[in-house]
Each structure stands twice: as C-alpha cells, then as structure tokens.
Amino acid sequence: MKKIGILTFHRPINYGAYLQAFSLSERLKKDFPDCHVEIIDYMPKKEKKKIYINVLRTVKHEGVSGGIRDLKKICAFRRSYKHLSLSKHIPYNKDLNCLYSYINQNYDMLIIGSDAVFNWNQNGYPTEFIPDYKFNIPVVSYAASVHGLKFFDEAKERITQCERTFDSMSYIGVRDRTTADFVKFCSPQSEPVHCCDPTFIIDKEKLEVHARKIESNFPIKEKYIVIMAPDSTLAKSIAQKYKDKYKIVAVFKNSKYADQFLYNLDPFEWANVLKNASCVITSYFHGTLLSLVQGTPVIALDYSSYTSEQYEGKLRDLMVSRLALPELFYEGEYANEFSEDVLFWNTFDALLSGSYSDRINSAVEKEKAEFEQFSKQISNILQIK
C-alpha cells in the first residue's frame, strides 16, 4: 500500500486551517482507497507558542473572561483532532532535514498544502513548506498560497532556494494568481497550476455528522445573520436594519452590534452555524468559502493591507477573479461607504431572498471540478491505475 503524507497547517486555532486539512485528506482517502493517506503531525515551536500568546493578548485587551473564552475554544479544537487522519507526532527539531528524512523514509509521496504554506512570515525562514532537500519521492503542492508575503522584496538567496525547490517538484498547485506570480518570480521555467481550495470539495455529510449539538440557548432553526468581521458602520447598519426580522450572531470575534456571541465552537459546529445562517458578513477567507460551499449567501469584506497593484489579495482573487461575484466583495476601507448605498441594500435583500443561489452554486461547482485534474496527476505520478 502506497503512503501519501500531507504537510500543512492543521493545528492552529483556526477554523479554515483545520477544515482545509480535513477536507483534503478525506477526499484523497476517497479517491485513492488503496493508498494510506495521513497528515504529517508536525508543528513548529513558533506556531505552538502563538496559540498561547494570543490567549495572553486577549487577557490584556478583554480581561480574564476573554482569556477563558479562548481556552474553551482551544479545548473545542483539541476534541476535533480525533477526526483528522494524523501520523504519529513528529517532535520539533531545528534541523528541518530531520523532518525531511523522516518523510523521505516513510512516504511514497509528499503533498505540501493547502493554505498559506508558501508564506514564512509566521514561522520564519527557512520554512518546512519549501524544502531545500533531495527527496527520493515525488513532492507536489496543492492549492498553496503565498498570501501576505511581499516576495518582491525578499533576499536573493531565499528566492534562489525557492527556485531549487520549485524546479524539483513534480507538480506545483497554487490557490491564487499571486502565488502563481511568486512561483514564476522564483523559477521562471516552472508551470504552476491553479487548484481550488480543498474546502470546495469538503464532505458536507461528514461536517454534519461530526458537529455536536450547538448549545441549547442557540436555536439553529431561528433566522439569523452572522457577522464575522471587525465592527464597522456597515455592521451597525445591517444590525439596525434587520434586527426585527433576524437575530444578529457574532462568530469568532465579538461585535457590539450582535445579539449573541458564539465563541467556543469546534470547526464542525462553526461550519454548521454558517450553513444555517440566512446570510454571512465576513472578512475571513474560509468563512467566505464555507458559506458559499454550503449554499449560504455571503458578503466578503477585505480589510487586508496586502492588496496592491503588485499583490492581489486572496479574497479578491476568490470572489472577483475566480467566482465572478464582484458585487458580493468589498474592500474593507470602502465598506463604511456602502452602508449608505441603495445598490448595496438591493444586493443584500437579493441575497436574503435567494436570488443569488444559482450563480453561487454554478461558480462553486466549476471550482470543484478542478480537483479531478489534480487527482489524475496524482494517479499518474504514483503510477496508480
């Protein structure tokens, strides 16, 4: 039995990171039943420390009660790790060659990604996700993203190392156009291929099966609008305009305009809350994606300072370039202006009435089809019929 290892972000207290890892591993297990597929359970020290630094930061700004909320959320995530196909734990080692040697000896293929694995801002450089190592097994990336890394300003020696890595890969799958630009910037001879984020092909039945019952004080069948974005004039206007018809629910981050704050959800419960919402307003990439995939209308707000003429942000890439839904995407700095825009409210009412359902479903299905091409590539590389 051939063994496929996935190296990705899977342990941060981050809903999108968890679910993209879950989705990719589950789909590969389905497509390759004669292979053993597992997520390589490796976590850099910086990533682990960041979890608890964030708790301390919350305590500083919100007090002890905020820190307790964060700890409850960490516990909810830990309960969910049993649903991931994890390898035995691989202890952190400063020498990344120890990790690569383990992978080389124990797997028949390494898949790097999905998520922002080509961005080393968080965990430093060198990064485990761009391995400068001579593997004896094929190495590919799936829906990798460089989002947040201003690579045109990076040191030449780092770009040269990336070139060696990309030149040695059997397949370079990227999630967005900026990442394709990054790969070509490092290695002009490489041919990056666009791949849909694995959340597009998530097993929706398993999402429901794994979700525990949402706390009794939150009736899931009640009509509600989810706000998962920084407070703004827009959030305030939505709450004021629709509070008589819809409950306003804040998820992940609290909002002073919300009727209720859900803070200790596990990833499956989070997906379930998005699924049953009448509409979602979010500044989060996977919050946008999980809403669309489950048929929930969404307004995506991009507050990132990364977007510029050189770097297209991941939300713009998704909503404008990939899904062709520009009227559902707003640059954060202009979000407040739309609170007075009649056209915006017409669009929002159309979302609530279901007028966008066909367009959203069509765009999602088109993206999902991309995974079939990746699956065929894996079959060819591993020589599986």
Image (tube, rainbow, N blue to C red):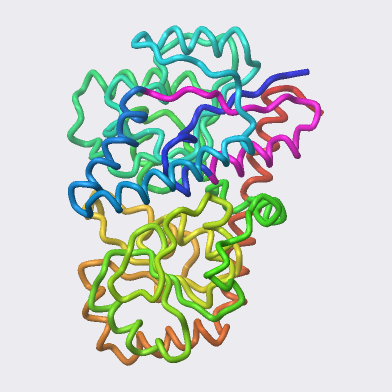
For residue 90, above or below residue 150 = above
Image coordinates for residue 112, horizontal then vertical, percent: 50, 29
Q: Which image quarter: residue 257? A: bottom left
Lateral position of residue 337 relative to residue 325, left or right: left
Decide which of 280, 355 is in the foreground and name it.
280
For residue 25, above or below residue 1 = below
Lateral position of residue 296 relative to residue 66, left or right: right
Query: Which residue is found at the position 41% from the left and 71% from the top?
Result: 260
Decide which of 115, 140 is in the foreground and name it.
115
Image coordinates for residue 267, horizontal then vertical, percent: 53, 50
| Count of number-bearing discs | 0
Query: Which residue is found at the position 46% from the left and 14% from the top?
Result: 91
- State the extent of the magenta-drawn residues as a range: 19-44
For residue 359, above or below residue 26 = below
Query: Which residue is found at the position 46% from the left and 62% from the top?
Result: 288
User: Any magenta on residue 324?
Assistant: no
Locate the C terminus by quadrant. top right
Decide which of 333, 75 is in the foreground and name it.
75
Image coordinates for residue 167, horizontal then vertical, percent: 44, 21
Decide which of 209, 169 is in the foreground and name it.
209
Locate the N terminus by quadrant. top right
Image coordinates for residue 357, horizontal then vertical, percent: 59, 77
Lateral position of residue 122 relative to residue 323, left or right: left
Query: Which residue is found at the position 40% from the left and 87% from the top?
Result: 243
Q: Which image quarter: residue 303? A: bottom left
